[in-house]
Image: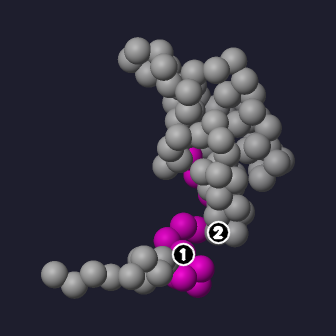
Amino acid sequence: MQTIPPSEHIIPPSESLIEYPSDFPIKIMGPTHVDFAPTMLELVISHDPTFHAGRMEERPSGKGNYTGLTVTVRAISREQLDALYTALSGHPMVKIVM
């Protein structure tokens, strides 16, 4: 079986599969904490100033240990989405970003 280097899995910006601008849902999961949703809201707004809390859905996990958020941002470029994904996935409260 041939192993493909991770860099070959990346789609070049010129070949983006998304047409911009577009509404783009992002799922974020982290521990249930009173500051989780407000912190993520602030972070998302820093990358999409048009975003508002009404576009955020919040769901607790079955046991209540984690909170799942779905934020639907207005993506204007691949660079914007990449920067937001990097900021979210690097945040200490975030466990998963999809």
Give the spatial CA distance, label 1 vs label 2: 7 Å
Q: Is residue 91 toward the left or the right of residue 19 in the image?
A: right
Q: Position of residue 79 (x, y in %)?
A: 69, 69
Q: Is residue 18 toward the left or the right of residue 86 in the image?
A: left
| Mark number displayed over residue 78 | 2
Answer whether residue 75 is visible to the viewer in this image.
Answer: no
Q: Nearer the viewer, residue 76 or 7?
A: 7
In which quadrant of the rendered image does the N terminus lie?
bottom left
Residue type at mark 1 is Ser
Answer whether residue 15 is visible to the viewer in this image.
Answer: yes
Residue at 58% x, 84% y is 14
> Relative to 54, is 83 above or below?
below
Residue type at mark 2 is Arg
Span colored in magenta: 12-26
Q: Is residue 20 toward the left or the right of residue 98 in the image?
A: right
Residue topped by disc 1 = 16
Q: Residues within 10 Å of mark 2 (few under 14, many from 20)?
A: some
The image quarter containing residue 13 is bottom right
Circles 1 and 2: CB distance less than 8 Å? yes
Q: Nearer the viewer, residue 43 or 95?
A: 95
Q: Residues within 10 Å of mark 1 (few under 14, many from 20)?
A: few
> Relative to 17, is 63 above or below?
above
Question: Seen from this angle, which residue lies furthest left?
Answer: 1
> Relative to 76, is 38 above or below?
above
Please say whether residue 25 is one of the residues in the magenta stretch: yes
| Mark number displayed over residue 7 | none
Q: Position of residue 91 (x, y in %)?
A: 67, 45
Callout 1: helix, strand or loop? Answer: loop
Question: Seen from this angle, which residue lies furthest front?
Answer: 92
Callout 2: helix, strand or loop? Answer: helix
Residue at 69% x, 53% y is 87
